[in-house]
């Protein structure tokens, strides 16, 4: 269960060819070392780039709950590898025993971050596959191998999907425009390219001259720590701001485009995302600035009609009263920490997916995208 | 010029009888100790309550520019005591020499925080008084004494004015309501009671059951460090939030009233205040929540017709890239730090002053308040 640290320098990871750094990587068993899921420890960024090796699903769950890995799409891929590790490490000798172990692992992994739909979606896919294989009479070894294949497939799909979103979204960004984004939705939030930041990255790669305003994204500072780090690596011009500065910049005409990711999207387009996104939606609307969501179809939860059905995760208030381990508020201060908010569809100009851009009314346009499948 | 530290415990300060702590205090010369302006060092709050003694105007200027003391009304009182200290420490033997020294001191003090109108206002009053006394043929010693008397008068006036604002504003807050505020506008921002936080305090003292949402107020965290500390001392129920949570709470119906202070108000009611206030104005408007400014008449600058004439101070980006001395953003990250923004009058329901509440259209109502003089 112990996490093992390997420095990124000692293990240059370039497998996906999507950039100068990898968010996660599967390491096959070799030289007496067991299989492992390697994760770029996002708690140590931007100061150190260290890969952590998770040897079993409990270590994966711990990495998720402590936020060494975060971001909805990355959590989906991580969850799938976690299920593969659960199968590989399981002592089961009969398929039904393996299924029981996978049920325990799936429940454990799901509960580490209940708001992110991709995590549950990936775990579900793994469990469904295992069930089908058991019903088909396949061996424990075959099921293990198939689960790993599925995890790798979800991993590759995520990168391909991000590239597709990037291509669709890049067209929307005006050349010479100033783009504002919130939280981290780059390669670090995904398996390798990015959703909202992937759109920005694709626009930059397409030769558009853009400048990015990076919301620092309190309380967890994903913008200051991760998005600024990624833009720095990618050499895309950016300026870091506090979340409270976004409205001021809009009022001065210094923002032409806003794009954020999503943690869960309802059938009608209502979008749960990092706390602060809702305010951006209201401000964008007041200033007539295009406001887009970039998210893969797996983030859309067709089982819920609107945002009122999305549970809002309350995280530890210590993240509000302290910053980087330093206490800012007085001892005993009461604080709140809703980690997400819901932006109503009426503030959203479009949802950029891997199959194209859904436009209002979203009930119809989202359905149409799914029907292409 | 050196600042001298005296612990609050060793020097219990209760002179004003306005609460359990004093923001600033004049210490007369006694027992071989020279006169000094004592300031509660706000850089050390909420962890330590330490009084710093400023022995000359340069020390006062340093305390202002390093933000050991901050908040528009407190800066006014501090500036006046700074001018008194400049007169007391001046080596001038002739009134015209003293006037020249006061001109240098006034310029120096004014330039420490150019956005805050109260600072310039107080310095101006001191210089005008000195000029008049010189013209009347008064002695250097008399001028010194009169300047100290004026500083004490401005100090007392500030507390009285805050109490009056509190009484007018308290009536507006609904009993049982949830009130949101930004930055610090309490006793710590003034000479002793508070502007926006004074209104909240007066409502609490009047027996209204209220709960306060405290914006932490990045980048400088005046809310987390100072407002939370004050509410804690005053035993008023509060919850600390990040600035990005305010919109979410409004969307859930959890905010019934918003009140902030002001750094400068134009003739038409446009209000410059701590960065993030503008976003609150837009959000309050979108949610139909009463949004008030609480500020003394000295904050209103009748010389400017609207907010476009208010210079926005750019402060060090180190306050954005680091928090409490800890670097959060990558080395070399670009950042912006506009310290203030301007909320247009159309988002403001009323301006609570010591003479009553100005209502839109503000050009007329503000003029009427001044004419009562």
Image (tube, coloured by chain):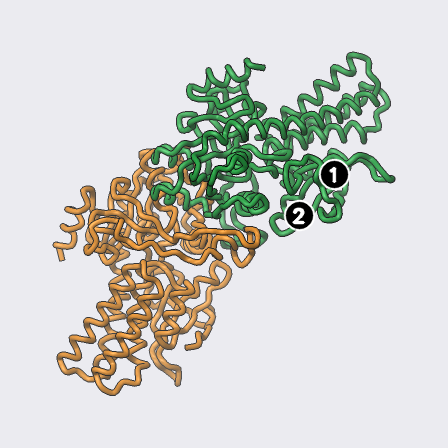
Chain colours: A green, B orange
Compared with A92, B33 (above or below) is below
Q: Residue furthest bottom?
A: B93
Which percent across, then down, holds residue A119? 63, 28
**Circle 2 marks a residue in which chain?**
A
Which percent across, then down, holds residue B247? 41, 37
Compared with A194, B271 (above or below) is below
Question: In screen coordinates, is A326 left or right of B234?
Answer: right
Which percent across, then down, holds residue B234? 40, 54
Q: Which residue is mark 2?
A: A49
| Quadrant for the C terminus of chain A in the image | top right
Compared with B39, B176 (above or below) is above
Question: In screen coordinates, is A324 left or right of B230?
Answer: right
Please report the residue visible at 37 percent of the width from the left and 69 percent of the height from the top: B61
Q: Nearer the viewer, mark 2 or mark 1?
A: 2
**Circle 1 marks a residue in which chain?**
A
* Numbered tag placed on residue A54 in the rendering: 1
């Amino acid at each position: 269960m112990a996490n093992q640290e390997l420095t990124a320098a000692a293990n240059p990871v370039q497998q996906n060819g999507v950039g100068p750094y990898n968010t996660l990587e599967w390491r096959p068993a070799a030289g007496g070392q067991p299989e492992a899921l390697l994760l770029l420890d996002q708690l140590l960024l931007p100061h150190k780039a260290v890969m952590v090796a998770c040897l079993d699903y409990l270590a994966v769950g711990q990495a998720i709950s402590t936020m060494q890995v975060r971001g909805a799409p990355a959590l989906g891929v991580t969850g799938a590898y976690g299920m593969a590790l659960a199968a590989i490490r399981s002592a089961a000798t009969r398929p039904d025993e393996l299924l029981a172990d996978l049920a325990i692992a799936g429940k454990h992994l799901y509960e580490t971050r209940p708001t992110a739909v991709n995590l549950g979606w990936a775990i579900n896919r793994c469990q469904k596959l295992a069930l089908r294989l058991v019903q088909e009479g396949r061996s424990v070894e075959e099921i293990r191998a198939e689960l790993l294949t599925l995890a790798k497939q979800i991993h590759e799909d995520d990168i391909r999907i991000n590239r597709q979103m990037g291509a669709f979204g890049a067209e929307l960004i005006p050349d010479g425009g100033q783009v504002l984004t919130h939280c981290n939705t780059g390669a670090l939030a995904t398996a390798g390219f990015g959703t909202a930041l992937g759109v920005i990255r694709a626009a930059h790669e397409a030769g558009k001259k853009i400048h990015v305003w990076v919301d620092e994204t309190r309380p967890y500072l994903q913008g200051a720590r991760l998005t600024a780090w990624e833009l720095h690596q990618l050499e895309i011009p950016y300026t870091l701001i506090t979340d409270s500065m976004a409205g001021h910049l809009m009022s001065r005409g210094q923002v032409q485009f806003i794009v954020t990711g999503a943690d869960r999207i309802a059938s009608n387009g209502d979008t749960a995302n990092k706390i602060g996104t809702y305010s951006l939606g209201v401000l964008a609307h007041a200033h007539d600035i295009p406001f887009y969501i970039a998210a893969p179809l797996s983030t859309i939860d067709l089982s819920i009609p609107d945002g009122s059905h999305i549970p809002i995760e309350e995280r530890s208030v210590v993240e509000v009263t302290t910053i980087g381990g330093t206490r800012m508020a007085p001892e005993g201060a009461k604080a709140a920490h809703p980690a997400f908010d819901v932006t109503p569809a009426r503030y959203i100009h479009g949802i950029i997916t891997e199959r194209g851009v859904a436009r209002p009314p979203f009930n119809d346009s989202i359905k149409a995208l799914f029907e292409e499948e």
